[in-house]
Amino acid sequence: MNARTLIEKQVPKEVSKPAKFGMFGGKFVPEILIASLSKIEAEFIYALQDTEFQEELATALRDYVGRETPLYFAQGLTNYYKNKDGEGPEIYLKREDLNHCGAHKMNNAIGQAMIAKRMGLKSVVAATGAGQHGVATAAACAKLSLSCTIFMGSADMEKQSSNVLLMKLFGAQVKPVEGNFKEASSEAIREWVGNLDTSYYLTGTVVGPHPCPSMVCEFQSVIGKETRRQAMEIWGGKPDVLIACIGSGSNALGLFHEFIEDEDVRLIGVEAAGFGLDSGKHAATLSKGEVGIYHGAMTYLLQDEEGQIIRPHSIGVGLEYPGVGPVLSFLKDTGRAEFYSATDKEAVEGMYKINYMNNYVKLFNFAQNLAPCLLFAGYLRLCRLEGIIPALEASHALAYLEKLCPTLPNGTKVIVNCSGRGDKDAATVCNYKWGTGSN
Amino acid sequence: MAATTAASITTAAATTAATKLQSSSSSLLKPYSSSQLPFKFTKFTTSRAPSRFAISCTLATEAAVEMEEVADSDPSQWKRPDSFGRFGKFGGKYVPETLMYALTELESAFHSLKDDPEFKKELDGILKDYVGRESPLYFAERLTEHYKRPNGEGPHIYLKREDLNHTGAHKINNAVGQVLLAKRLGKQRIIAETGAGQHGVATATVCARFGLPCVVYMGAQDMERQALNVFRMRLLGAEVRGVHSGTATLKDATSEAIRDWVTNVETTHYILGSVAGPHPFPMMVREFHRVIGVETRKQALEKWGGKPDVLVACVGGGSNAMGLFDEFIKDEDVRLIGVEAAGLGIDSGKHAATLTKGEVGVLHGAMSYLLQDEDGQIIEPHSISAGLDYPGVGPEHSFLKDKGRAEYYNVTDEEALHAFKRLSRLEGIIPALETSHALAYLEKLCPTLPAGTKVVLNCSGRGDKDVQTAIKYLQRNNRLMLSWLWKSYFVFPEGKALLLSKV
């Protein structure tokens, strides 16, 4: 089977990926894009069947990205969540922060860049919010000698200036767009539409017209596949609970996808509640959104009564997305997955509960060194207990452990997707002000 | 230098005192009569009158220390180190008396734990799940293309991806090993020195992981250059103490850390960051880093069924280089190349090329090459990269240089910056400025290598911490930027876009 055959005929049902998930998903795009999307879908399906491509991808994931990432038993965190009887769940971290470029985004960027190269395209266009997807795309394009243009909201460019520098160092052109991620992605799609024959739109999220959600999900699903194998090796079973933060949902889907059919595995997504779910300044799409069409797909999204998109807010810039992947919308509606949210405060700030003596030492050291900043929950807890600096996005998932762990029976195996490292967030954490909850 | 002079004065004075004692033992008041002295002075004789500057250790109860004969040409016969911690004449233990016990205790603990299967299992588990080993051996396709000659021939370049480790450098391999050792020894406090901050971050990280309080000494000048690393250390719970003495850089931080250790030696373990310092540190740090070379051998065998032909690594103190080289020292067909920092130029006086321009002396407890003036005072080194800004070098490197087993070259700040950008643009990997020195040397090396030579370069750290420094230097030096952009227009397909970018 080759791509030409697939383009000329319909992609056979037995190998194609579903375009719709219940009522969610689909291909709500202008007619000019339909042909390009079909070409991409055909190339994608063909690549999945091609052993040479799979080998090349596996080599790139192993030697360039640094997979497989460890499933790390977080002793400090586990001890912290033990109750007074010494019982509690066992907490493991899937270390996506150890990937090249420091986040799970690279799994998808390298896969899609390789597809673009196969298609003979010379340039790549992408949009980025936090900058992680932009950095990963720019790096992958440098490696594969593709020219790269990244669109980024000007507000985001200021907050994440270090990521902008990284993209430029990789040789990408970074174009500012008035607004934030949603404006940037619209602009990127416009640019793509203008150059359909030579450029490839590299999506970083599981939102978008078919086949984008399926492609991103497929490339990110390596996370879940490795997790299954590692769980079997470490404790001879499956995980009981999987937790991940949700912006658009790529890291969550990457972890969950493998286990969707395993009904005994609980899937928990944690969104950003920003200043609070009732404040109007949050990004908790699955809690507060309504169904609509956005970026080519039907899904939950944050919209007002007139159907206009509400600008989201979160201290974790990567979670600031008004929509969410259609698969996740479907998982919510069917009740297969549970979705909660954590505020900026909970992710960054909170009471630092001390259960054992040696933390007092760290408490005093910390107070001396970081007087203006205060004791934080998800973010700082992982720094102090495990020596791992998580991204603020991943800190939302870690913050939810506060509410979850007291409810879990002894010995429950919990895996949290540590989706990125937090060096990029150091300045934000430093400037965070107690009480006002602002930067 | 100070230690040896002190030793000579003490021994000369003691000799004189002993001679006096011999002639007037009966006039000594009790309880100091000769019969109560720990050894028999009356039997003491000197063969000749000692001069003012002689070093004579004849008061020692043990036999005089002999320099062991080292078979010159056969690396498998070399003792690295010998029982006194020396690599040939380099190395040793030039430290105040208070530290001797701690060093001996450390050495014996290390030797007993090194082969302990439980210790090894624990260490391997942490290296795998926490640090993220094994790090890949990555074939740098575009870099290899870049170095192909017009006839299409050239070496194959592989990068050992130590930049993918947790905390972003090779430093954590050693930090993890040493903190496990410290816990076994029952130490309650950890101290460390740091230049670039990477070792400080690695130490703070492992201390957070293992629940030990941590103090990191850092030169005030370095703290400014590497503010991100300072903040990371504080986030992880370490106390970062700025050192303002001397030139406020790595060597002063090391001196301060040693001072702290001398004061608190019973409760404190000093995690030295490089293969410098008194024995057993050079050996211990090398042993914890040698996993780099061991993995490389295995991966080379898997990838091309052979050994690497050339190993290239940057050299500051020398830990990443030793980690890669150690496994291959006995393989004489493997070329070992270390690249130091030539700063503003090897003749400018502002560089850190110890093995090229230094002379033998004692610094921080070990005899090695170091950058010193005619009075034996340390010359302040300079490099754009804080991690290579060290006026000394590990004694084992000095040994390998003298034996001719390894070759040492140097590259300037400017060449390193070019290499920094080159790897970013060609492979989508941002190397640390330290690593960029090794990468820069490829420019001179590759044209001399036959087709298909397997070159493995230790990509010892990632460069996110250096982006601000690199941009600052590049923007300041417009001529540099324009000439780079001019070259890149012709080299890279996306040259036009680069010219238009503001970097």
Image (spheres, grey):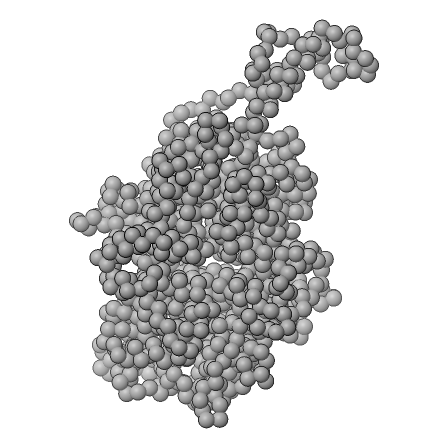
Quadrant of the image occupied by residue B495: bottom left
Q: Residue furthest right?
A: B30
Please report the residue visible at 58 percent of the width from the left and 71 percent of the height from the top: A347
Viewer-proximal residue among A10 and B177: B177
Can residue B114 be seen in the rendering of this structure? no
The C terminus of chain A, quarter of image? bottom right
- B297 lies above or below A121: above
Q: Quadrant of the N terminus of chain A?
A: bottom left
Q: Please tell me which residue is depicted at 56% across the width and 77% down the height of the picture.
A: A274
Left/right placement of residue B376 relative to residue A50 reads right
> In this rendering, is residue A330 above or below B216?
below
The mark tally for this picture is 0
Is there any visible trace of residue B183 in the rendered image? yes
From the viewer's side, name the closer residue of B402 and A439: A439
The percent position of residue B35, horizontal first and vertical second, equals: 77, 12
Examine the image and state in which quarter residue B340 appears. top left
Residue B212 horizontal side relative to residue A101, left or right: right
* Image spot of residue B361 (x, y percent): 49, 28
As drawn, the residue found furthest toward the bottom would be A306
Residue B488 appears at what percent x and percent y?
A: 26, 57
Q: Residue A248: x and y, percent?
A: 46, 77
Q: Residue at x 28, y 55 (%)?
A: B482
Residue at image coords 54%, 47%:
B220
Q: Which residue occupies the foreground of this view, A295 or B21?
A: B21
> Relative to A437, is B68 on the left or the right?
left
Residue B258, quarter of picture: top right
